[in-house]
Image (tube, rainbow, N blue to C red):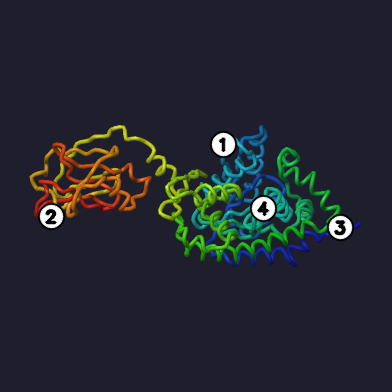
Amino acid sequence: MRSTLPTFNEVWQRQFRSGFLKQSEQFQENTQFLIGCSGGMDSMLLLYLMAALCPEQVRAIYINHQLQAISDDWADFVAAQCHALNIPIIIEKVHVAEGNLENQAREARYQAYLKHLQPNEILVLAHHQQDQAETLMLRLLSGAGVSGLTAMKSLDIRENFIIWRPLLDVSREQICQWVEQCHILYVDDPTNLDTHYDRAWCRHELWHILQSRYPKMQQALVRTSILMQDADEILTEVLQQDLTLCGNTERLDLTQFAMLSQARQRQLLSVWMKGQDGYRPSFEMVERLQNEVIASKNDAQAALHWNQFYYLRFQNVLYRLTAETYLASKHVPEQNIAEICCEIGQDLTLASGQFQIQAEKMGLSMALLNQTLRLQYRVGGEKIHLYGRVGTWPLKKAIQNQHIFPWLRHTIQILSIDNVMLGVFTPKGFWLAQSDYVEVDGWLPNLMS
């Protein structure tokens, strides 16, 4: 009995070849393609198609995860097939970190792709219709939101590269038939049958149960992913408006933030915390940021750590700090006191910034140039008589008055000579102290950056 599926030649002439070429029309003439080829049925069909359609623009890459003893043999197989098709091949061994094996293998694989992608090259992957439906199902079971349920895009334009998935609308059944008709060789990965892995479990345990009840389930899930992509695009436009209203990638104005609905607040925080990372924070992590930091008392100095960043509230603004910046404020400098000599035009690289010694109408005495001056980090309890101000007041109060961030206050240093305070180096500049060393036509360290 003849199969109800169209043959490869029928689809090739009537549908697939024209659709394939139409997709590629959006690429420039000199665009090159790097095919991620595992040696499996899907990627070998893709390799065969690309070799037929644009043979001079294609090269392939095989990622050896070194997780199975036979992976070296698979590398040799892919290399031989590429040689037969006259396609250059890259064999790249990667180390898969500990943790969730599927996620870590994917991360290692994409890092290897990025290592070899050229500026004018597009990464081509062999994901098909069932892959798309499985991805949506697994993300749904993990509690993903709209962004996660978009699953995969046929043309995925990312910050540093582009992924093209020309087989995304093709069913696995069609791929199996076409590979057989075209006599394409491939390898079988036994882990695809190991239900210890989520995707294999979904494919071999869950899929047939759901499909027996809902025969059109796969097409319905794919349609849902397309609708989610539309919704995500609309949501992205709203999020961009909200981010512009509330701040930028490093800070959010909580006064403006409070004007948004709770749903928009959650979505904005989720995307803002994600930053350039591939994954959004969990729902629980966003709730912790709202409850533990945003809703904390003004003087609580609460901080939340997630994915190499710390989130803090200061002066009704929410800040996103690198771990390096935040943790530096928690360490006491090994050397609290240093000695420096200054001269006109000299650059000083200090903890609080880059300063340059410049002549000023009013400043420190020229007699102090080339003298040994003392530089000391503040320890607390110091008082300062700022030049031009009446009376002495606590240095801590001056710092607070100038709204210097708490995580930068450890960089402040006091300049003195013979126990006389000359001034203070801060992230907001050099504060000149009232003393007998202040004179007309003197000099000052001016903050450059």
**Mark 1 residue type:** His
Residue at image point 54% right, 57% down? 158
All told, the count of numbered labels is: 4
Q: Dot 2 lies on which element?
A: strand
Task: Sort mark 2 into few (<14), some (14-19) or many (20+) by Cα contacts within 10 Å.
Answer: some
Depth check, front residue: 198 or 280: 280
Amino acid at dot 4: Ala
The first of marks 3 and 4 along the sequence is: 3
Viewer-proximal residue, 405 or 21? 405
Quarter holding the N terminus?
Answer: bottom right
Q: What residue is disc 1 on? A: 95
User: In percent of the image, x 61 and y 35: which residue is there?
Assistant: 66
Query: Which residue was labeled with disc 2?
Result: 362
Residue that label 3 marks: 3
Q: In which quarter of the image is residue 168?
A: bottom right
Contact (CB < 8 A) between labels 2 and 3? no
Crowd class of label 3 (few under 14; some 14 to 19; many from 20; radius 10 Å): few
Residue 337 visible, this orientation: yes
Q: Relative to 327, is 262 above or below?
A: below
Amino acid under label 3?
Ser
- Determine which residue is flagged by label 4: 126
